[in-house]
Image (cartoon, rainbow, N blue to C red):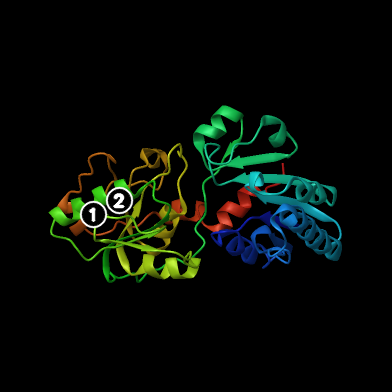
Amino acid sequence: MKILLVCKDIGGYARKLADFLARDNQVCFIDTSSLSERFARAPKIIRRPLKRWAQLHQFNKALRTHGQFDVLLVINPAQIEAKQLAAAFEVCTRKIAYLYDSFSRWPMSREALAVYDEVFSFDPQNAASYGLKKLHNFIYDDYDADADDGDYSAFVVMAGKDRVPALEGLARAFDQLGVSDYKFLVQCKPIPDAHPGITFFEQRLPLDTVGALVKRSRIILDIAKPGQAGLSFRFFEAMAARKKVITTNPGVVDYDFYNPANILVIDEADPQIPQSFISEPYVDVPEHVYRKYTLQGWVEKVFASD
C-alpha cells in the first residue's frame, strides 16, 4: 500500500508511526514543521507569503516524486496549510484524518471534516458531538518487561505555564509524603517564586530523551490541558515502560487498561496521593488489552478496509 502521511510533527510521534508503517508499505512522510525556512530573514511584510510559497513548492515536489497514493493520513489537519491539504487530496484515493488534539485547541468545522472518508479523534467528547470515530493514541516504544524502579519517584515534562499551578500542588503533595526525588520539567520561561522542585527549560526535548526519562522514573504525571478529555501519550509511554500514572484526567477510568493499582486520578485543586500508591508494585496490563494500544493495533484499526 502507498501511504501519504502528513503532520506538523512537533512531538516526534508521527515519525514513529511513519517508521512503523514503512516496514510493510511505501510511505511518504511529510513533516510540515521541517519544511523550508529559506525566507526567514526576509522583510516582515513579505516573509509569510514567501515562506508559504516556498513550503508549498517543497510539499508539491515531495508529492511529484512519489506519484499517486492509495491512502492519505493527515494528523491534526487544522495545523496544515489549506493549499498543502488540497495538493495532497489530488494524489490520494482514500482520505483519513486523525485528531490527537481537542477542538478546544485546534477547532475544525463540520465542512472541513466532511472532505475525509474517515475521521478519528482521541477525544471522546469531540467524537460523540461530531459523529467521529473515537481512537486512542498509541504505544510507540517497545515493551520493557524488565523495567526497574529507576532514579526518580515521579516525572513530568510539559510545555507552557498554564498548568504550573497544578504541578506545584503535586510537588507539595509529594513533599508532604517525604518524597523529593522527583523530576518536574516545564518548557517555558522561569516563573518567579515557583516551587523549587520544578525545572524550567527552553528547547523542546527530543522524544527519545523523554522516553529515557520515563524509563528512569517510577510514576509519570499527566496534567490534562483545559478542555481535554482524550488521553495524552503519557499513558501509553507509561504502559510500555510499566510505570504508574497520576493524572487529572478522569476519563481514563473508561478505558479497559485502567487499573486503580496503576493509575491514580486526582483532584487538581486538592491532590491527595496515598502512600500505598507509591509503595505498592505495578500490576501488568493483560496482553490482549495491551496489544490494542500498540502501533500494530492502532494501524490495523485506522487502515482497516470497510
For the C terminus, the quadrant is top right
- Contact between marks 2 and 1 (CB within 8 A): the answer is yes
User: Is residue 73 something that shows in the picture?
Assistant: yes
74 or 103: nearer the viewer: 103
- Residue 296: where, in percent of width, then height? 58, 58
For the N terminus, the quadrant is bottom right
The circle on residue 159 is none
Which class describes the residues within 10 Å of circle 2: few (<14), some (14-19), or many (20+)? many
Q: Amino acid at mark 2?
A: Leu
Q: Amino acid at mark 1?
A: Ala
The answer to whether 130 appears left or right of 136 in the picture is right
Q: Secondary structure at mark 2?
A: helix
- Residue 162: where, in percent of width, then height? 39, 46
- Residue 222: where, in percent of width, then height? 37, 50
161 or 277: nearer the viewer: 161
Q: Residue at x 20, y 48 (%)?
A: 273
Q: Residue at x 57, y 52 (%)?
A: 298
Residue at the spot of label 1 = 171
Residue at the spot of label 2 = 167
The answer to whether 228 appears left or right of 278 in the picture is right
The Cα atoms of the two marked residues, 2 and 1, are separated by 6 Å
The answer to whether 186 appears left or right of 170 in the picture is right
User: Is residue 263 something that shows in the picture?
Assistant: no
